[in-house]
Each structure stands twice: as structure tokens, then as C-alpha cells.
Amino acid sequence: GNCMKRCLLCHALHPASRSHCTGCGAVPAVVDGFTAYAPELAHGGGGFKATYFEKLARLEGSNFWFRVRNDLILWAMQRYAPDLTSFLEIGCGTGFVMSGIARNFPGVELSGSEIFTQGLGFAAQRLPSANLMQMDARKIPFCEEFDAIGLFDVLEHVDQDDVVLSQIHNALKPGGMLLLTVPQHGWLWSRYDDYAFHLRRYDAVTLHKKVKSAGFEIVRSSSFVSSLLPAMMVSRLLAKKTDVPYDPTSELEISSGLNRLFAKILGAELAVIKSGFNFPVGGSRIVIAKR
């Protein structure tokens, strides 16, 4: 198609098929084999421990929370962006979400970006055909390019979340969809949030205001992981009381019995969301919004 890129240096538009900017001749860097639009950030800096990717790649597939979140994301795409032909996931990590999308939307052209090239290596193994790039979400080099853009538990890591949202607005085609999940409720803040480099947990009012002021119209918004809220609160309170050194992956490495139970509970919750009900409170929130 007539895909356009926006040069991050001179801001001129040029055809995406060209590797260099036709305005100023700039060519994006390559870091670890990936096109890099923010090479100075590729090996560290912002908002995540890069060593965490390896653990994630190992645990995501079996952990109830990642599986249920994937089900929710895939359902939301089928329900709210059924005709999409191009999709960008910002902060695609190890490619776990994208591999689910690839299976369910085989015709869709998939792109994924990460601020760290380290996660992209895992994603490239899972998704050899996806267009993977290193990028700073505050400076997106595309203009009216994608039918849908996904951002799954990424926004809470970025200082200038409002800039990211308006950049996404520019990179979407008119009528394109934003799919967003974030951790919710400041009162659930725990050592886990500190460890994961979260800058904030959102409340619905603030999040909706930010999404709207970036130019979006909100199509659907619901909490999820609502039924596990009591369990989350208890585990947070206990964690506050103990002096035990904190192991962040303990939240992922739970017993298989609990894992199955939680998956069942959240599966039931998902059915309620699919039927049209929006939960007011919950550990996370999903927002679907339209440009």
C-alpha cells in the first residue's frame, strides 16, 4: 500500500518502502540486527530490566494471567477491529501476544516494537515473518499507517504517557483502533510495581481523560482481573508485612493447582465482559478507542 513513514530528524514524510528519508537522506541505525529508531536506548535505560525477558519467555505460556490477557486481547480485536490488515504492537516484549494474534489473524501484517533489542530476539524466534523494530514510543516514525495499535501493560512504564498516546493517534489510519491494557488502582501499589518499573497504576477517570485528549473516542472500557481483587489485596498486604527479600517472579511461578483455578475464575469473568458488562474495579483495565 501507500504506507508513509515520518522522518524523526526532518519530519518529512516518505514512502515506507524506502529505507532512507527522501527529505534529508537519514537512514535509521541497525542494532543487533534490528532497525533502530532510538538506538541510544536500545541497550538499557528506560523502565524495564532487560534480563526479565528471558524469564518472561519461559513463564508467559503457562501463567494464567498472561493466557487470560491474551484471550481478552484476541477477543477485543475480533470484536472491535475484525477487518484489520495491519497491526503494530508497541512494547511487544518476547512476542507472546503477537504469536497469538498471528495464529488468529493469519492474513494480518504484523509489526512489533521494543525499546530494548533484547526482547526482540525472543520475538524474532516466535515470529520470523513479523516486522520487528527498536523504537521509542514517544517518537513513532509512522503516519496513518496501521489499522490497529496495541499497547499491553506498557503505558505505565513511560514517563510521558500523553505523548505516546498522541503519537499512536498519528500512526493510526483514520478510524483505526487503539487497544490498551494497564494495571489499575493506585491502592494496589506494591513491591511488584517498584520492581517492574511501573511509574503509576491508573484510575479509569485519569486514563479516559488522557486517551480522549489524544484525540480518541472510547469505544469500550472495562476492568479485568476483578474477581481476583480480594486475593491480590491479601497478597499485597502480606508482602508489605514480611521482611523477606522480594522475588518478583513469585507472582508468575505459582502452583499449577492455583494457576488452573485462577484461569477458570478469570475465564468466567471474560465471558461476562464478552456479554457486554464492564467491571468497575479490577487489577487491570482494558480500553478500546477509535481514531
Image (cartoon, rainbow, N blue to C red):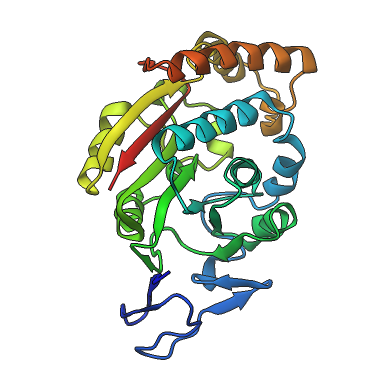
Camera-side residue of 219 and 285: 219
From the viewer's perspective, tell me whether residue 252 is left or right of residue 181: right
Relative to 191, residue 120 above or below: below
**Which residue is found at the position 65% from the left and 45% from the top?**
99
> x, y percentage for residue 266?
57, 16
Relative to 50, residue 224 above or below: above
Relative to 39, residue 118 above or below: above
**Which residue is found at the position 72% from the left and 52% from the top?**
126
Camera-side residue of 205 and 149: 149
Camera-side residue of 166 and 144: 144
**Which residue is found at the position 43% from the left and 32% from the top?**
79
Residue 209 occupies quadrant = top left
From the viewer's perspective, tell me whether residue 282 is left or right of residue 128: left
**Which residue is found at the position 34% from the left and 27% from the top?**
221
Q: Quadrant of the N terminus?
A: bottom left
> x, y percentage for residue 157?
47, 46
From the viewer's perspective, tell me whether residue 18 is left or right of residue 125: left
Relative to 202, residue 159 above or below: below
Number of disc labels: 0
> x, y percentage for residue 158?
43, 49
> x, y percentage for residue 112?
55, 56
Residue 122 occupies quadrant = bottom right
